[in-house]
Amino acid sequence: MLVLSRKLGERIRIGDDVTLTIVRIGPNSVRLGIDAPRSMSIVREELCIDFSDLPETEQFSEETTSP
């Protein structure tokens, strides 16, 4: 894993097509702007969880508590 330090407004380039921009830095979070081709899928990791591996009762609670 590459770990970088960036300041507000600074950017990170990933390949030729993707740019991450530090938009806001708060006490407990960082807001990123992502500039990428529309054909590229960008999804928060928590939305990629496979609920089929969980017991049925946990599936229900996870699905109903997700934002």
Image (cartoon, rainbow, N blue to C red):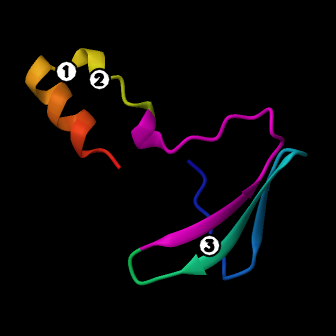
Direction from residue 48 to residue 1 in the image, left or right: right
Q: Please state the extent of the stretch shown in magenta in the rendering.
A: 29-47
The stretch drawn in magenta includes residue 26: no
The stretch drawn in magenta includes residue 33: yes
Pick the front one: 11 or 32 = 32
**Residue highlighted by disc 3:** 5
The image shows residue 46 at horizontal and vertical percentages of 40, 41
The image shows residue 24 at horizontal and vertical percentages of 59, 79
Quarter of the rendering containing residue 37:
top right
The image shows residue 58 at horizontal and vertical percentages of 13, 29
Q: CA distance from mark 3 to mark 2?
A: 34 Å
Q: Which mark is residue 51?
A: 2
Q: CA distance from mark 3 to mark 1?
A: 36 Å
The residue depicted at 41 percent of the width and 84 percent of the height is 27
Mark 1: give few (<14), some (14-19) or many (20+) Cα within 10 Å. Answer: few
Direction from residue 54 to residue 5 in the image, left or right: right
Name the residue type under label 1: Leu
**Against 9, is 3 above or below?**
above
The residue depicted at 54 percent of the width and 80 percent of the height is 25
Q: Mark 3 or mark 2, which is nearer to you?
A: 2
Q: Which mark is residue 54?
A: 1
Quarter of the rendering containing residue 47:
top left
